[in-house]
Amino acid sequence: MKHKTSISSKQPDWSREKPVTGKYEPWKRLLRSIRRYQALQNNGGLLARFIKPLTVLQHRFWSVVCGSDIPVNCQLGGGLMMPHPTGIVIHPEAEIGPNCMIFQQVTIGTGPLPGVPKIDGHVDIGAGARILGGVNIGEHARIGANAVVIRDVPAESIAVGIPARITGPGKAD
């Protein structure tokens, strides 16, 4: 059975990151500072040399406000959502695909398998989840709250528990 969704796992929906006038969403400001730093890093130039330190300062400010540890040089796909960013920790080398959603207290980092996680597009990661080591999370997968993922999760599957077990349509038999 194919999982039906209107959110793409390949094409980023940049409107998800756009700040809404009159709404206090510090995570969008944090993402904007990361995106701005990465654009300056890629473009280079004399002006970028002077603006980058200010962007880093802005990133640190919004990191403290959000209570998150997301490095400016991490690989985040477009359309990322973090409705409750408190306690989110992402390893600088982890890869996160487009249109993912990460809730509070999530850790994405090193673990028992060598390497860091690679998360495909449109993956929802529940509050308190841990994705550790060189695991691959397939597109349209869901990681349950407080799950500890230490092995690959196939596309369109659901991972729950400690250690996480795979359930749902993409379950390997």
Image: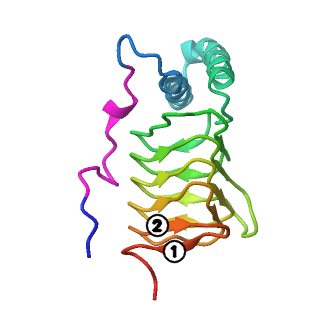
* In the displayed structure image, the side of residue 45 where residue 11 appears, left or right: left
Residue drawn at (24%, 62%) of the image: 4
* In the displayed structure image, the side of residue 120 where residue 108 appears, left or right: right
Q: Secondary structure at mark 2?
A: strand
Please identify the quarter of the rendering in which residue 55 is found.
Answer: top right
Query: Which residue bears the numbered disc 2?
Result: 158
Q: Amino acid at mark 2?
A: Ile
Q: Where is residue 19 shown, x and y percent of the image?
A: 39, 20
Residue drawn at (61%, 20%) of the image: 62
Answer with mark 1 or mark 2, whichever residue precedes in sequence: 2
9 magenta-colored? yes
User: The N terminus appears in which quarter of the rendering?
Assistant: bottom left
75 magenta-colored? no
Q: Amino acid at mark 1?
A: Ile
Q: Where is residue 125 shown, x and y percent of the image?
A: 51, 52
Q: Is residue 20 above or below residue 27?
A: above
Instruction: Identify the magenta region.
Output: 5-19
Please identify the quarter of the rendering in which residue 23 is found.
Answer: top left
